[in-house]
Amino acid sequence: MHYILGVRHHGPGSARSVLNALEQLQPDCILIEGPPDANDRIAQLSHAEIEPPIALLINTPVQKDERPRAIFYPFAEFSPEWQALQFALKHQIHTEFMDLACQHRFALEKQAEEVRQALEAEQQTDSEEEKSEDEHVDETLADAASDESAANNESIDEDEEDAFEISDEERKFLQYRHDPIALLAHQAGYQDSERFWEHLVEQQPHAGDMFQSINEAMAEIRDYLNSLNPNTELDDDQLIEQYREASMRKIIRQAQKQGFERIVVICGAWHAPVLVDLKTSLKDDNQLLKGLPKTKIESAWIAWTHGRLHRDSGYGAGIQAVGWYAHLWKHYQQALAGKVDAEKISIDWLSQFANALREAGHDASSAQIIDATQLIQSLLQLRERRIPDLDDLTEAIRSVLHHGYDLPEPIMNQMLLAEKLGHLPEDYSELPIQQDFLKQCKSLRLKLEAVHRGVELDLRQPFDLSKSQFFHRVNLLGLAWAELQNYSSGRGNYKENWQLSWQPESSLYLNEMSLWGYTIADAAASYIQDKIEHSDDLSTVAKYIEQILLAGLDRSLPVALQRLQSLSTLHQDPDVLLATLTPLVTALRYGSVRQFSEHELFQIIQQLSIRLMLSLPQYCQSINDDMAKQTAQQLNSLYLLLQRLDNATLNQYWQDLILKLLQQTYMNGYLHGSVTKLAKQQQLLDLDEIEHYLSQALSVGQTVDYSAGWFEGFISDQALLLLHEDNLWNLVNAWLGDLPEEQFINILPILRRSTSDFSPSESAKIAEKAASGVTVHIAQLPHQFNLERGYNTLLNLRNLLHPQLACVDGAEKADLKEGSDVTN
């Protein structure tokens, strides 16, 4: 005989009812909804170090030509399936998983995808052929036929509209197909199916009658939905469901043939009704499951998180409040004689919420907790329920602890999620790359945690440097675990800040990366070398080189540099060359802390820099305003890069480039002004030469647009030059004064943009100078200076620098105030 226990995956009330039923039934065999391919993994759950949540990972073997197919079967402490497995292991009861084997499921899914792709390709081919035929149709015949078919088209359109209209039955079927419990919930007056199920099932203490009622209710729902479904043809999901349920019945029959007499079947409530009658469906099941395709599969236990239970659907269950379910399960375990202390459930939850509010800086007193508890008890009496649900508690918290205001979302998320990462023994990681990963985590004292945790590294310390290289290697493999928070391009920066957060799917991704090597270092090196060899983008290869240096993968550097060298000969575009130089120059700063040779890398940087500077003069001729601004920005970026390199040869090439650009004709005004500013900043031009270029740019022979562009390119960040140099001021003043009113109005936006980066004080002084109509020297501006404080400062400096000298007397002090030298 077999007993069907229909449950809600990861429901604490269902878990409690399952345990009660198992105690009453005392089965000799337990069948649990899950992949039968992984039956050999059940015995591993007896290990004392296992701590849920965990998940059973089933996947196809890793291959280079396609990503593996995978499915996760998660288990939380409050999952009925987990409690049943623990009960079976404790009492040494024969236990198996019961479902469509994943070796068949993956193969069927692949077949369905191939059929779908073939149909899409066929449809595309047909549409292209029809289009080609239509192009050869005689236009005259088409015009003649168009009038005749107009009326027919209207009737066809009406027929098509009628065909696409959805009946009430179809609408109901689509509405309740993916949430059948909502059908019962709406009939019972509930808007939320989750709340309905929690009140009706999860909070009920009795096992036997409840499971029988669930089976009957689900049978009615299935019959009703089948009557609404107008389509006799099954879609992919419905077809897989048929295979699954047929496999479940087959496994139950096999257990009966093996001589088990008290078989308990634990499955999702939706499947329960179709697992009762095993005889009627025997022939159809055997026919359906005959000759199913197969594929190779692998299985392993991996750590899971509450966060994934919250986000996922299906076996993940899409639990909206994992923290609440964990809270309920803790109190269900503490129940005496099956009686749950509802008041203690409220008090503990309210206390946790009050602590979270206090930590966030909100008020939450003990008196408020008492008031909120009394309010909840009153609500339960009014609503005729024994145990509060999450909505009851949230209402009380909002009303009493938060004075009627909406609760802070971060605190709500913290409480509802109650993030937790499960734990598995290290020897459960079977792939070499997984073992190497865990070994390095252990040696570097790193914990795999779901919560976000910050790590600050000092790269001058060998231990922290090893951590940094490990993080960068993991990132190279694409593993979403460690995220670099700060990134500085300055030389001598020895700090790195990382944010760590382990997600369960990272285990599967780590399995995929085993294709590239048995260790993290080997896999990262092989993976990045493959990407470099297949990349034709120069700047991308340069970024890979930077990542290689960060990860300390020295053996991959020659391959990357050789690829960069071969690609660089094909590119002359300044955009590409500059995008390539930026990560390479940045990478040089790692030599001080990461112990790699800079010589070969610097040679490539030097070659690319020289090639870039030699190509720029021709590139800068006859370009429009947008390109001129982009080129000016590129020149400034190149200047900053060369400053960081501080190489005499490259500096000379740079100076030659600037001087050549200054002499170049047919250059955009903005770009020429920007080049003049760069030359002035590097002291390549004296003041007379700057006046010459300014006078030339603002002369009558130039167009107003050219002059305005030149002025914008030159004067940005140069307010003090205008204030201090009267000759430059007079040239600009004369140019603006001679402009016709219409032209002056036209260039006002450019003038406004040119001076927008001046500080308020600089703008005020320029306005004062312009309003006065005379030259105002900055040195003549009034100032406030405290002679007494100045004297004390100088005296303190004298005593620090010359402590052997005696303090000055009163006469010396008087002389000092009048400006005498105190430095002796």
Image (cartoon, rainbow, N blue to C red):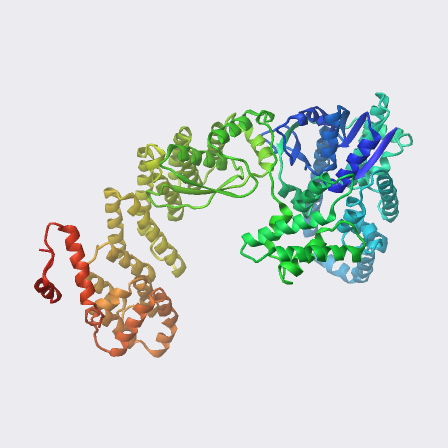
Q: The N terminus is located in which quarter?
A: top right
**Residue 176 appears in the picture as rendered:** yes
In the rendered structure, the answer to whether residue 357 lies left or right of residue 461 reads right
Instruction: Please tell me in which quadrant of the rendered image residue 60 appears.
Output: top right
Q: Nearer the viewer, residue 331 or 689?
A: 331
In the rendered structure, the answer to whether residue 715 lies left or right of residue 407 reads left
Residue 176: percent from left, percent from top: 80, 49
Quick check: 75 above or below 324? Answer: above
Instruction: Please tell me in which quadrant of the rendered image residue 34 appears.
Output: top right
Residue 377: percent from left, percent from top: 74, 55
Residue 73: percent from left, percent from top: 69, 35
**Residue 294 appears in the picture as rendered:** no
How many labels sit on residues? 0
Q: Nearer the viewer, residue 77 or 371?
A: 371
Q: The C terminus is located in which quarter?
A: bottom left
Residue 483: percent from left, percent from top: 49, 42
Looking at the image, which residue sits at the far top?
A: 258
In the rendered structure, the answer to whether residue 70 lies left or right of residue 264 reads left
